Amino acid sequence: MSLVGKKAPCFNAPAVLNGNEIVENFSLNQFVGDKYVVFFFYPKDFTFVCPTEIIAFQNKIEEFEKRGVAVVGCSTDSEFSHWAWLNTEKNNGGIKGVKFPMVADISKTISMNYDVLAGQYDYNDDGEAVFNGAPVAYRGLFLIDKEGIVRHSLVNDMPLGRSVDEALRMVDALRHFEEYGEVCPANWKEGDEAMRASSEGVASYLSKH
């Protein structure tokens, strides 16, 4: 079920801030009315593709911040696992130096509410609760506007790493639309010509391209 156009599911969960501070009740609600949010899920701490994505987001964090965007990561690991990984050097498989919030979704309810959990709870023939599939999140990404509405989402299977530059492009497209009322055509990037959402606007754009 797509969340695009809907309110981003609320949650209060433990998180690690600034790479070293554990808080018990982190929420995306703090950004409503103030910042856009890029909220992304990854499968697991201390793995392989995941640190490349997380460090790539950190490497571009100034680009997000100057656009008024809060970047927030989340996995089904505990806040203590996050803390340990955040305090492990990169040459030992860690992500030390990452400063944006890392949410702990041990209950898996956040992943379920965002529909990125790679499995589901069920009952076997004896009535016992079992989990079918992988109890971790797919590589989901959600761009949430300042009103708390999801405007873009992307979900990759676990082997497929995301493009941080594409996330930035989506932020730029949303901000351009909000500021100018123009829609952004295929492969649009900041500085390119956009177009009016009308038959005349489309015709004018296509005639130039």
Image: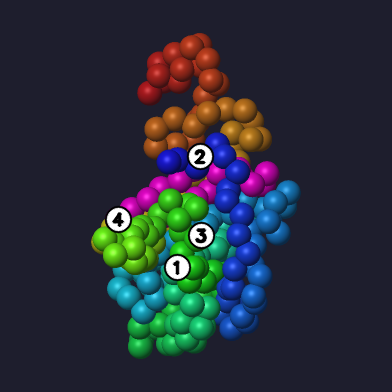
Residue 101 percent coordinates (x, y): 57, 70
Query: Magenta includes 24?
Result: no
Determine whether the residue tagged by mark 3 lies in a helix, strand or loop. helix
**Nearer the observer, 159 or 163:** 159
Dot placed on the residue nearer the N-terminal end, 4 or 2: 2
Name which residue lies at 52% across and 71% down: 104
**With 66 as the anchor, is 198 left or right in this view?**
left
**Nearer the observer, 128 or 112:** 128
> Which residue is identified by label 2?
4
Name which residue lies at 59% across and 83% down: 20
**With 97 as the anchor, is 92 left or right in this view?**
left
Dot placed on the residue nearer the N-terminal end, 1 or 4: 1
Amino acid type of the residue tagged 2 in the rendering:
Val
Query: Which quarter of the rendering shows the N terminus?
Result: top left
> Which residue is identified by label 3?
110
Q: Main secondary structure of the magenta part?
A: strand
Amino acid type of the residue tagged 3 in the rendering:
Ile
| Image mark for residue 75 | 1
**Nearer the observer, 105 or 4:** 105
Say if mark 3 contacts mark 4, CB within 8 Å: no
**Nearer the observer, 192 or 106:** 106
Amino acid type of the residue tagged 1 in the rendering:
Ser
User: Badge 2 local density, few (<14 within 10 Å), some, or many (20+)?
Assistant: some
* Real-space Cα separation, disc 1 to disc 4, in angstroms: 14 Å
Residue 37 percent coordinates (x, y): 59, 54
Residue range (magenta): 138-157
Dot placed on the residue nearer the N-terminal end, 2 or 3: 2
> Which residue is identified by label 4?
157
Say if mark 1 contacts mark 4, CB within 8 Å: no
Determine whether the residue tagged by mark 1 lies in a helix, strand or loop. strand
